Image (cartoon, helix red, strand yellow):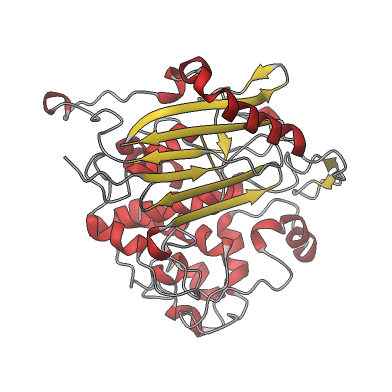
Amino acid sequence: MADSRTRKILFTSAAGLITALIVIIAGKSAFGKRASAEQESHPVPVNLNETLTNAMSDTSSLAGFDKMVKDYLTYWGIHGASLSVMRNDSLLFAKGYGEADTGKEMQPGNILRMASVSKLVTAVGIMTLQDRGLLNLKDKVFGPDGILNDSTYNAAIKDTLYYRITVEDLLRHKGGFSKRGGDPMFSTRWIMMQNGWKEVPTQERLMELQLKRRVKFVPGTAQEYSNFGYLALSMVIEKVSGMDYESFMQENVLRPAGCVDFHIAGNYYKHKLPNEARYYVQHDDEPAEEFNNSGRKVTRCYGGNNVTGLSGAGAWAASTPELALLVASIDGKPEVPDIISKESVDLMTEYFDESTYSLGWNDTKDGYWTRTGTFAGTSALVKYFPDG
């Protein structure tokens, strides 16, 4: 048996501008061992999102807690939220609050955009490739000897400091990418206007544009939060694996963890998945210019930004129970089998100082692991505590 320490994880996501907490608590025995010894060669994954309902977590002993959550949503005008609680690596509580869409109750199986919590997912993908010997965190990313050594990118580079950027620099936001003119991941319309482009730039075109700029600081010597750096990591995963980013992550990271309903989110309501929640903005939020420079005004959370284009920097959507399961699969504890090595878990969660991001996590000081994410319509938080 494992020790009796209790691990807590808090994750927040909701259909609206939210700060509602989604709590996950972990400790000892598994979400059910993923497969018996006889089944290991052909495991049959359990789709938590098709299994769980609010009724499973209804209990009179939590009536006061339910009221507190509902009051919180009402006070802040939040349309919906999802909450999961896991203890001893067994899911104890999974419940939706409010609406997933007009007239549809939020259920634990509804998936929601998680914004920059996606970076944690991407980091696990990178560590998976390192575990397999397909890359190393010290590998250079750009230049003739880099992973992304395409001739177009090499020709675009004017500042040879790009040659110093490593995979680890990208994970720790130490790449030195310039944000002159704004974050390129949230400036699509501006970039199109400045360059006279009629089409939304692909990630390859964005990369070429970025590489023409000078770096802001010598890579590895400072840090500045970079969404673009995690887009570059998504492209590294594609180049090394030979697969598109979403497919590689689903087949090699998420499904092995038992997460069968993670998806890259669409940009518009019409593109949402059947069990995906609807997103909202504050009632006084002004319509936004559509990201593709069409001239149309849109609700900011549906067309204001190129969410799909964020890729591994912020495009994943999932349910809170499956997100809890993923975290239980990368925590180095024995109860739920990890999908990455103990060495990779240690590397991801090693804490240095306040000027150094952890790998995928925002912070891991004193065993308290934090990952946040937010943009229009969504706010998300994963918080992992070392004990109860």
Residue in front for this viewpoint, 350 or 386: 386
- Residue 157 appears at what percent x and percent y? 54, 77
The image quarter containing residue 352 is bottom left
Residue in front for this viewpoint, 167 or 47: 47
The image quarter containing residue 237 is bottom left
- Residue 384 appears at what percent x and percent y? 42, 50
Residue in front for this viewpoint, 311 or 300: 300
Residue in front for this viewpoint, 350 or 275: 350
State left or right for residue 73 relative to residue 260. Answer: right
Most extreme residue toward the left is 38
Query: In the rendered image, is residue 134 in sight?
Result: no
- Residue 221 appears at what percent x and percent y? 48, 83
Q: Is residue 348 above or below residue 264?
A: below
Which quarter of the image is occupied by the N terminus?
Answer: top left
Q: Is residue 66 above or below residue 135?
A: above
State left or right for residue 221 relative to residue 309. Answer: left
Query: In the rendered image, is residue 14 in sight?
Result: yes
* Count of labels in the image: 0
- Residue 281 appears at what percent x and percent y? 77, 40
**Residue in the image at 64% along x and 58% along y:** 185
